[in-house]
Amino acid sequence: MQKILRISLVVMTCLVIGYLSGMVTRESISTWYPTLVKPVFNPPNWIFAPVWTILFIMMGVAGGIVWSKMESDEENVKKAFRFFIIQLGLNALWSFIFFYLHNPFLALIEIVLLLLMIFETYSQFKKIDKIAGYLLIPYLAWVSFAMILNFSIWYLNK
């Protein structure tokens, strides 16, 4: 039961962070964002909420699985969780920089750091539990795509 509780707590934390990030973007989605020139591969706006919800759930399950290994590998779990928390904070920060500050260039720099932290989190998680690591692969792929999209938006609007 303790494993399920830990997974649930981390999933809820990730979803709350995602919700708060969404609140930051809400106004800009209807005002500032439509004024930007976007690349042809820009997804429709409706796709982002369900994709992020799924990714936050997968991220939370991965984090909960790793947290449940605390008794058997405390040092590595603490190290991995530090990266997890950093990447989660950077994830939220990106929305603030891009949508609230309207700064695609600074958001581009930040998303590169985010991608590096996600990769390190994936690497640390995989050492502790392979499934937890694999659960982060879609997140890694989506943020890689988001980085390309971010770059394209900055480039087309500079």
Image: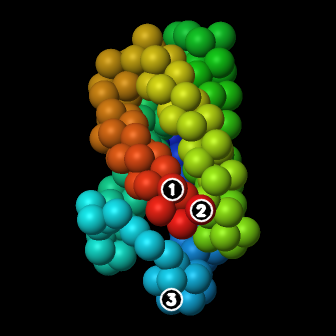
Q: Nearer the viewer, residue 121 or 141?
A: 141
- For label 1, the residue is 155
Q: Nearer the viewer, residue 116 or 155?
A: 155
Q: Is residue 3 visible?
A: no
- For label 2, the residue is 158
Looking at the picture, which amino acid does disc 2 mark? Answer: Lys
Distance from Cα at disc 1 to Cα at disc 2: 6 Å
Residue positioned most to the bottom: 31
User: If you read the primary sequence from the N terminus, does the residue marked by circle 3 or circle 1 appear first?
Assistant: 3
* Residues at discs 1 and 2 in contact (Cβ within 8 Å): yes
Distance from Cα at disc 3 to Cα at disc 1: 21 Å
Task: Specify whether 95 is left or right of 148.
Answer: right
Residue 63, relative to residue 152: is it above or below?
above
Crowd band around label 3 with a 10 angstrom C-alpha radius: few (<14), some (14–19), many (20+): few
Residue 113, quarter of the rendered image? top right
Residue 56 in the image: state x and y as whole percent.
44, 53
Q: Which mark is residue 30?
A: 3
